Each structure stands twice: as C-alpha cells, then as structure tokens.
Amino acid sequence: MLVQALLVLVALAGSGLAARYFFKAQFIHQVSSQLKDSLLNLSHKLPDPIGSDWCTNSAIGAEFRLTVLGADGKVVCDSRGLEIDATLPSRPEIVSARAHGFGEAVRHSNYFRDEEFLGALLIPGRGVVIRGAVPLSRLSQTMRVVDTSLGLVLIIIALTLVACAIYSARRLVFPLGRLLLKTQGGGDAFSENAVAGDLTREWFDEWSELESNIDHMRRDLMAKTQSLSMEQVELDTIMGAISDAILAVDPEGNPLFYNSRFELLFGGEGLRKRNIKLWAIFRDPEILSAFRAALKDGQRAATKAIPLEQKEGLKSFFSLSVSPLRKSEGTIYGAVGIFHDVTELKSAEQMRIDFVANVSHELRTPLTSIKGYVDTLIDDVNHQKPIMPEFLQIIARNTERLLNLMNDLLDLSSIESADILQKDPLSTLDLTERIVKQMQVGFESKGQTVEWEIKATTVVADTQRIEQVLSNLLINANKYTPSGSRITVIWESQGRDVLLKVKDTGPGIPVEHHSRLFERFYRVDKARAREQGGTGLGLAIVKHIMQRHEGSIWVESKPGEGAVFICRFPAPTTS
Ligand code: ADP
C-alpha cells in the first residue's frame, strides 16, 4: 500500500515538474521570439555611425535594456548607461549571435534582483551586435504560484494517500496480521491471552467473522491438544503400571514404543536411541515368527510359555501374544507384542506335578509293604501256618506311616487354605514347657536333655500353629540327634521381632541341603529318614506356618556341629 502511494506521489510530482518545465520553456520561447522581432525592427533603424545615446532613445519601456556592440567587440551604447563590463563580448548570447546570427541566454540580474532574458542579434554585413534584455519577473511570479500550487496539491495528495494507506492497513493488513498471529502454531500463540481483544464488527465486517471462526477453531484445537496430551499421560501411566512387558515394532523391526516393564526386563536404557532391532533383542524363533506373522500377514499370533533370559541373566517364562498395528485405511505399520510373565504359573504347575509324583511315591512304599505282608498272612492262614507276629507289627508300622502322611498332608492343606490366623500374645515359657512335657517320653527314651532360655517372654502368634512349629522342630531334634545329646529352646528378641531357636548337638546338616530342606518330601538321608518314620513334610509345614505369620525360617548348621533352626516372628503391626 505504502509503495503504491509513493509511486502515485512520484508520478504526480514528476508530471507536475514536467508541466512546469514545459510552461517555462514555452514562456521563454515566446519572450525570445518577441525580443528577436523587436531587435530586428531596431536593426532596420540603426544609424551609421551609431551615437552613444541611440540605445537610450531607442529602448522600448523602462525595463528594456538595449546594448550595441561594434564589430570590434567594443560596446557602442547601452540604454542603461551602465559601466561597461569588459567581459561583455564573451557572454554566451553574444558569442552565439556572432556564430549563428542570433543568441539568447537566461541569467540572474543584479539590477532586477531576478532572472532576465537576454537576446543578441548580429547585423550581417556590419558586424554589429544588438542585444536586448527583458526581466523575467512575471515568469518568476507565475513559477512561484505554480510551485506553491504544485507543492500544495502534492501535500494534499500525499496526505490523502497516507490516510487511504492507514485506512486500508486498518481494514486489511492489521486484521490479517492479527489473524496470522492467531493461527501461528505452538508456543504462546495458543494461549488465550496471546492476542488480546477482538476485531470490532463495525470496523472490520467479515474480518471479524473470520476472526471469530478462527478463535473458535483455535479453542477447539486447544481443547483437543489438551485432551490428547492428557490421554498421552494416561496412556503412559497405564503402560507403566501394566505388569506385562509391551513392545511395538515397525516392519523393519525397529522399536516404535515399549513400556518401562519391557525396558526393565529385556531392554536396558534407551533401546530406541541405540537403534537396536527386534532380531537383536530376541533370538527365539517362536517370538520372531509370531512378530513376522503379525507384520507380514496381519495375523494375531500367540506363543506358549517360552523360557527367556532377562537382563541379569535370570530365566523366566513368558507367553507372548502379537497383534498387527494398522492405520485407519488398513495398512500395517507395525506389530505390538505383550509378554506375560508365566514363571509363577509354570513353577506352580511343576510343583503340582512333583507333589503328585512324591505323594504317590510316599503312598506306594508303605502300601506295597502292607499288601505284601497281608498276602503272606493270607497264604499262611490258607496253609494253616502259624501267623508271624512281626508281620503284623510291620503292617501296623506302615499303616501308622500312612496315617502320619495323610495327617501331614491334611495339615499342609489346611495351613495353606485357612483364611485368618488367630494371633494372640502368648507366654513363651508356658508354650515351651507344655510342648516339652508332651514329648518328654520321647526325649527320655533316648536319654536326651532339653533346656530352654527365655529372653523374650511373649510372642504374638496363633496358638495351635506355633505349637505345631515348636513340636515339629523338637521331633526332628529328637529323631536326628543321637542318644544323650542336648537340645536347647531359645526365645530372644531381635529389634521388635521375636526369634525362636531350636538347637541340638546332633550330626548337623551339610550346607548344600540348607536351601532345599524346607521343600516338601525333601530329606537329607532318605533311607534314614524313612526308617525314623518321617513323612518329609515336617519342615515344609513349619515353613508354611511361618509364612502365614509373615515370618521366616532358616537353618544354621555345619556337619558334626549340630543344627540350629531359627524362626523369626515379626512384631505385630499396630494398625
Ligand atoms: P522328616 O519327616 O523326614 O523328618 P522334615 O521335613 O521334618 O521331614 O525334615 C526334612 C529332613 O531334614 C529330614 O529328613 C532330615 O534329613 C533333616 N533334618 C531335620 N531336622 C534335622 C536335625 N535337627 N538334624 C539333622 N537333620 C535334620
């Protein structure tokens, strides 16, 4: 707009100046031809010789100056009788007249204090030059009027143009600038206060409507951006909270996204930055073919439990399900795999299998023995042979073993399934005395001494279960330590916890068995343990009871130095 206005202004000024120049040239031309005519007339009247007062007499009007120069270049006469200037013969009008017959010039006159027009005419044959000079004061006056009017017109036009430019800027450029600012993406431009105020309807018509539309769109966009970022945060939180590991890859196997669980289990930090592909993370063919099926054929694929090595070399079992990721038009742009940790399920299943095998084995041995002796007894009766009383004793022992086994199994299952334990503060002294008294016969038969040290007087526990813990540990001490050995029950505090220690002076247990000692049916010396009538479930029962009390049990022992079984009962929570 401003450039346009300037161009118009320059064009106007140019044409004004051209008109001015043309007018001046025309005026001078007119003066020139009039002066030439006058000089021609005078030339006819020129006497010979020319008197020095001829000029004064022949001058037309007071403002007209007439000068005559002789053929020798000297001034013959001057109507104004001024002192003769020596440079006169070299003036341009004189030089031009001598060369072309007529010469003219426009110069400033000190006399008029204005411009004057000078015309010089050569009288052919005589070599005389007549020069006339007229003031151009009328031209100057006219020019001043023209200049003033032109200036005024230009100023008015300039002001009008500036006003128009401002008006247009306000109507067009200003609202456009504001709208541009409003539609700029990102940063503060999206904040409500980025562009304050609104374009008014009376000033900006449809611009104001456009602005309100843009405002509407902007608010819409802001709301959508906000809800999108909220959704992103929610998604991140959900992904972080999911216990399954999730990995999405593009068709080239580059990770698109993965959750923190995946990073923790398989990735290490910055999987994406390190540009590691799927084939470098997993080498298992089942996993790779599941991803391939989803990426190439768009099929959902699942695997059974696959053993996978994690970051720290730990092995866990994962089931994997892979689904293709599709764009709205249906093209596949990646696949997402969910790794579900089934290690616990797998080990529970293994435990169940082992347990059934162990129970069957434990049942079969006494049952086979019972069957064998019963068959022998039947045979003896049939052949009227005397019945061997030892056979009946063996049958009775095996039956008792079976009964013990069934009782221990039932105990285990009731400990595992019982809902709540009835925990009470119990006197450790009473408890110890009671249990030792019940087992007194057993200890006495082997000549064993039982002592106790009560450094913690109370323990919070389920009466029936804690009795079972102490009696199982004492039964083992009684069974596995030789005659004459010493057994000590110690109750002591450790911080707010209570420790129960059952110590014996028996053969001890080699360290390699310590970690497995509390497993069901685990025995250090199988033959001896069976001989002792053990079911292999005593310590497993103790471990489960301790777990139900949120406590723990461990053994400290070296072969030949006896064994100490330590149970930790945690301090009851106050809430
Ligand atoms: P069991 O019914 O066979 O005694 P437990 O679970 O009670 O089963 O004990 C598991 C095994 O731990 C026993 O077979 C025995 O080998 C070993 N054991 C337990 N207590 C002692 C102990 N005080 N001294 C030596 N060995 C022990």
Image (spheres, rainbow, N blue to C red):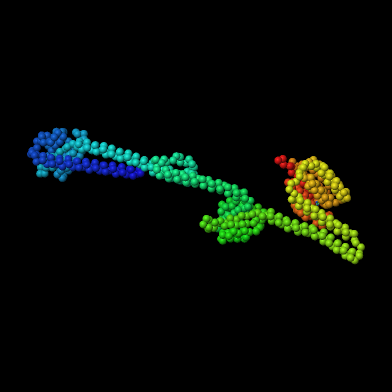
Q: Position of residue 195 (x, y in %)?
A: 46, 41
Q: Position of 68 compared to 256: left or right?
A: left
* Residue 353, visible in the rendered structure: yes
Q: Position of 48 compared to 575: left or right?
A: left
Position of the C terminus by quadrant: top right
Q: Position of residue 294 (x, y in %)?
A: 58, 59
Q: Position of 99 compared to 375: left or right?
A: left
Position of the N terminus by quadrant: top left
Looking at the image, is 275 positioned above or below residue 184?
below
Residue, x 52% and y 55% (percent of image)?
328
Seen as rendered, the residue at the extreme bottom is: 383
* Residue 528, visible in the rendered structure: no
Most foreground residue, 513 or 455: 455
Most foreground residue, 364 or 570: 364
Residue, x 45% and y 45% (percent of image)?
213
Q: Position of residue 203 (x, y in %)?
A: 39, 40
Residue, x 31% and y 42% (percent of image)?
9
Q: Position of residue 180 (x, y in %)?
A: 43, 45
Residue 394 falls in image quadrant: bottom right
Q: Position of 322 compared to 433: left or right?
A: left
| Number of numbered discs on residues | 0
Most foreground residue, 91 or 341: 341
Seen as rendered, the residue at the extreme left is: 48
